[in-house]
Amino acid sequence: MIHTMAPLVKDYILGNVIGNGGFSIVYKAIRKENNQEFALKYFKYKAGQLEGQRRVVQEVALLKILQHPNIIQMVDYNIKKTSLYIVFEYLECYGTLTKFNDEGHVNSELVLKTIMTDISSAIAYMHTMRIYHGDLKTDNVIVTDAAGPKVKLIDFGNADISHFQQREFNHVGSLFNMPPEVLRNLTYTDETSDAWALGILMYTLIYGHRPFPHLNAEQFKEKYRHGKFFILRQESKYSISEDARDLLDKLLVVRDNSKRLVKQGLMAHPFISAPFIRDTRNHMDEAKKVINLAFEYGSQQRFEDAFIASIQAIAHLNIFIGVSGGKDATMTNREFNKLSNKVNEYCEFTHKLNRLMNIDEYRANPIVYLRAICACSPPLLSVVDIGLTGEMYFKEGKREQAVAKLQEGVDEYLKLFQSEPIGERKEIVSVRVDYWLKILKYLAEGGDIPVEP
């Protein structure tokens, strides 16, 4: 059955549901203009809820950053007040790694090695940017070629960036794949959590089930709380080498998560022994480029695009801080604090953009709406506030102060007028400035009191 959602997904025809998540549905989709097939992930959330929007927009931002052959590629996205969809490449694939494993296709160490090499390459690449997946499991790996097999990592809804000043405990991902230290609130999710989850995935491919398959969620958590989480070796589905066993042991390190294999250590392990694909971009430069793009979108009143660009800029900046501010880096405390303040500035900008995405709620109050629509342009907002101060003095009968402020507002606006893009914002501000000119004329010549727009 074909479903159409023209108001929300105007460029695509939605077909069968091919996946479900906690907050999303994935459809097979056809682009109307060329009949090309894609996978479309559709989210729904409440208007004005920044956190709900931020989480799904962060997935878009990280997908724009992540470029790796074993990571699903995003090709399009669209964000509205209450919904967002992400369009991915559509792969005629076997299905999830869960299905591939359950049907007995992971039946030799060669197949295991091929799968583990692909996943490890994607994860190690992400970790060079301090990005963790946060929900690595067989359900979030798709088999794109059963003969290879070749696999790709999907679902970055729990992905985030870790850096050493992080303090909050964050339980993300699937319970049975979480490492002991996270479940016991001893630390937060980071790259070593992915390493543990990779170990659980490898264990499942070797033995056919997760550790402690007989335990339900509560029993599993109780075992972890009491420190009874030693993973015993069982009979494997097929013969495995000592190298495979050694890798499993070095991923499922219980007592000291810092000793789990990540990045170069993972890719150099004898069982993997594959090239290490490293990210080499300058994320400070990328952050500057993208935040400038966000300001440009804001000036054009493309607030949804500006919102995504600002979140992407925060991601680049956090990557730079995480990579350059770590224990082996040379960043000084002063530089670190300066960059942390810059992150806070960008975050405040995203809050403004989020309000602008829901700007219809402000139309009932002309002054609030005027200031809201100028929020993305600090110089223009400053002009508006100067003029509004002049209006206040005029209403209070303070003639000299009113003239000074209103004239200042008019003069400053004229400096910005030529560079201000044509659109609703320019029209609304110009109407307000015309009102200031009428007040100035009234104060100089008398006549009828100007009517406030």
Image (tube, rainbow, N blue to C red):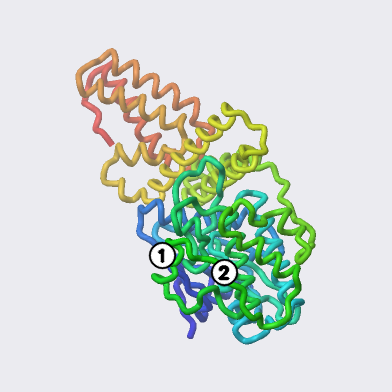
Which residue is painted at 35% across and 59% down in the image?
A: 46
Check the image and report above or below for 80 versus 283. below
Tell us which disc is closer to us: 2 or 1: 2
Looking at the figure, which quarter contains the C terminus? top left
Which residue is painted at 24% across and 32% down in the image?
A: 451
Horizontal side of 310 relative to 208 (left or right) equals left
The residue closer to the viewer here, 205 or 332, is: 205
Residue 209, position as x, y percentages in the image: 57, 78
Quarter assignment of residue 367: top left
Residue 341, position as x, y percentages in the image: 50, 33
Of label 2 and label 1, which has the lower sequence position? 1
Check the image and report above or below for 300 versus 179. above
Crowding at mark 1 (Cα within 10 Å: few <14, some 14-19, many 20+): some
Residue 293, position as x, y percentages in the image: 58, 43
Q: Which SS class for mark 1? A: strand
Horizontal side of 98 relative to 110 (left or right) equals left
Which residue is painted at 61% across and 78% down in the image?
A: 234
Q: Is residue 7 visible?
A: no
**Alpha carbon separation for disc pair 2 and 1:** 39 Å
The residue closer to the viewer here, 452 or 11, is: 11
Which residue is painted at 60% across and 70% down in the image?
A: 201
* Tag 1 residue: 44
